[in-house]
Image: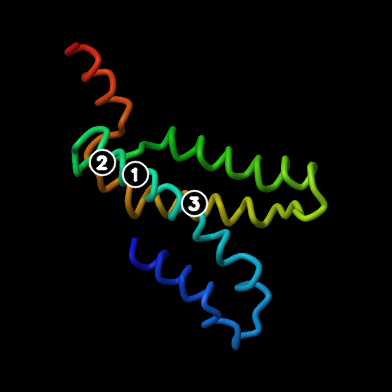
Amino acid sequence: MLVPYSVFAMNQLGWFDGLNSSLINSYLNDLLALPIILHLALIPMKYIVFKDENHALGIFNIIITFLAVSLVFEWWLPNESDQYIADYFDVLCYAIGSIWFYFAIDKRQAKPSTNRTYRRLENI
């Protein structure tokens, strides 16, 4: 996860401004958004909620997050305010970022959270 955080920070600090690339300026943050959001959600789940370093979000949670971010930023906000513009390539970037997170980070974990949740409730 060091790569997405580093690239995002470098982009925000203007390290890529000299490239004059509209693709980088328009879509790099959108490509990195879901891996960063999902990782930030995974940290408290691993260390506070489940206290299990092998905890994973699971495909269902990743899809729900992808849908929520896509709907809010590419449909709802553009309909509510002229400051926001719906761009369906952003949705594609969110999807690519979600898929990358699933295969590079989440799938390497042991089991999805839904299995552990049910087992914990059965022990109560």
Q: Residue 42, labelled with which disc? A: 1
Q: Nearer the viewer, residue 47 or 16?
A: 47
Q: Which residue ends up furthest to the right in the rendered image?
A: 82
Which label's residue is closer to the chain start, 3 or 1? 3
* Residue beneath disc 2: 46
Closest to the camera, between mark 3 and mark 2, is: 2
| Res 29 → quadrant | bottom right
| Res 52 → quadrant | top left
Residue at 60%, 83% in the rendered image = 17
**Crowd around label 1: few <14 · some 14–19 · many ≥20 (10 Å):** some
Where disc 1 sits, the SS reads: helix
* Residue beneath disc 3: 34
Please state, as top left, top right, bottom left or bottom right, where the N terminus lies in the image.
Answer: bottom left
Which label's residue is closer to the chain start, 3 or 2? 3
Residue at 32%, 52% in the rendered image = 105
Which three-letter amino acid code belongs to the residue tagged 3?
Answer: Leu
Mark 1 and 2 residues: CB-CB less than 8 Å, in contact? yes
Which three-letter amino acid code belongs to the residue tagged 2?
Answer: Lys
Q: Residue 109, labelled with which disc? A: none
